[in-house]
């Protein structure tokens, strides 16, 4: 699974990279994004007045809450959606068909269990990113939910999830799952709010090749959500 990631790009850089038309909400850069945190996401919505497609930078909360949920308490358990079942599982199927997004990241963290002092196992964090750095466009879904017990005036909660797949061999020693990516040439097709065929969407999901990513151990600073900053993604000597 992808349970923690870094997304430190400046909002202006995200606007330029993803050719964003409107910025709805800005999320402060973070090197330690955790479940239920607001995160930067790129979406496309249809303007109700002009019928034009508008690409937006928004800030959903990480951990998807399906529109039919009775409450939002299960969000932290739904930070990932498996690519193998995302088109059919009730929690994700509707969003996969019509509410897809891109979740920009510098990279993501995974933990490997290693022998520690006195044979006590320790969890060693690794950072996985594009070779040489850059933005990782993770495939995501987003959803709208409101607490209907509060009446029509209840605010909308916007949440998201990362689509994952089996890890490539180069990462299998760290974890057996990894986020799926969307290639830059497919961003428009992935985000298109007029596109509702799950088979077409599934064809856009991409697993990066081994020579496109790099992995390295980092300090256990990331283990605490209170820690943040570039030291979290600095390779161990």
Image (spheres, rainbow, N blue to C red):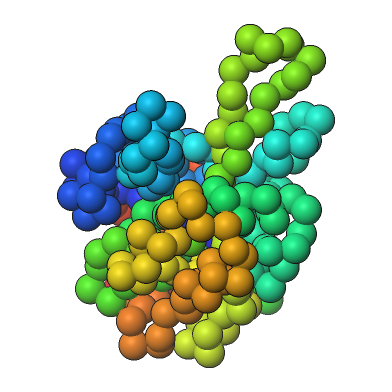
The quadrant holding residue 54 is: top left
Residue sitting nearer the eye, 76 or 16? 16
Image quarter of the N terminus: bottom right
Which x, y percent locates residue 206? 47, 76
Residue sitting nearer the eye, 32 or 167? 167
Q: Is residue 100 left or right of residue 210?
A: right
Q: Is residue 233 left or right of residue 179?
A: left
Image quarter of the C terminus: bottom left
Which x, y percent locates residue 50? 34, 32
- Above or below 125: residue 47: above
The quadrant holding residue 51 is: top left
Q: Residue at x 78, y 53 (%)?
A: 90
- Above or below 3: residue 46: above
Q: Is residue 41 left or right of residue 18?
A: right
- Residue 87 seen from this side: yes
- Residue 36 seen from this side: no
Q: Residue at x 31, y 67 (%)?
A: 184
- Above or below 90: residue 127: below
Q: Residue at x 39, y 76 (%)?
A: 215
Which x, y percent locates residue 108? 44, 62
Which x, y percent locates residue 162? 55, 57
Q: Residue at x 26, y 44 (%)?
A: 20
């Amino acid at each position: 699974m992808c349970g923690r990631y870094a997304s430190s790009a400046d909002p202006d850089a995200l606007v330029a990279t993803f050719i964003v038309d409107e910025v709805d909400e800005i999320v402060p850069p973070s090197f330690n994004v955790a479940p239920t945190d607001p995160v930067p996401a790129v979406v496309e919505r249809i303007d109700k007045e002009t019928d034009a497609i508008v690409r937006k930078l928004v800030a959903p909360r990480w951990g998807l809450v399906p529109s039919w949920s009775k409450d939002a308490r299960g969000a932290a358990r739904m930070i990932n959606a498996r690519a193998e079942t995302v088109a059919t599982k009730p929690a994700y199927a509707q969003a996969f068909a019509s509410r897809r997004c891109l979740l920009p990241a510098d990279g993501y963290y995974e933990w490997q269990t290693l022998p520690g002092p006195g044979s006590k196992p320790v969890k060693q964090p690794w950072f996985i990113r594009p070779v040489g750095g850059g933005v990782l466009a993770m495939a995501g879904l987003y959803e709208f939910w409101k607490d209907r017990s509060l009446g029509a005036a209840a605010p909308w909660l916007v949440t998201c999830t990362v689509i994952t797949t089996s890890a490539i061999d180069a990462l299998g020693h760290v974890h057996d799952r990894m986020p799926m990516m969307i290639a830059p040439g497919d961003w428009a097709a992935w985000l298109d709010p007029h596109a509702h065929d799950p088979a077409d969407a599934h064809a856009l999901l991409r697993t990066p090749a081994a020579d496109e990513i790099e992995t390295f151990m980092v300090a256990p600073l990331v283990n605490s959500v209170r820690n943040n900053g570039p030291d979290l993604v600095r390779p161990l000597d």
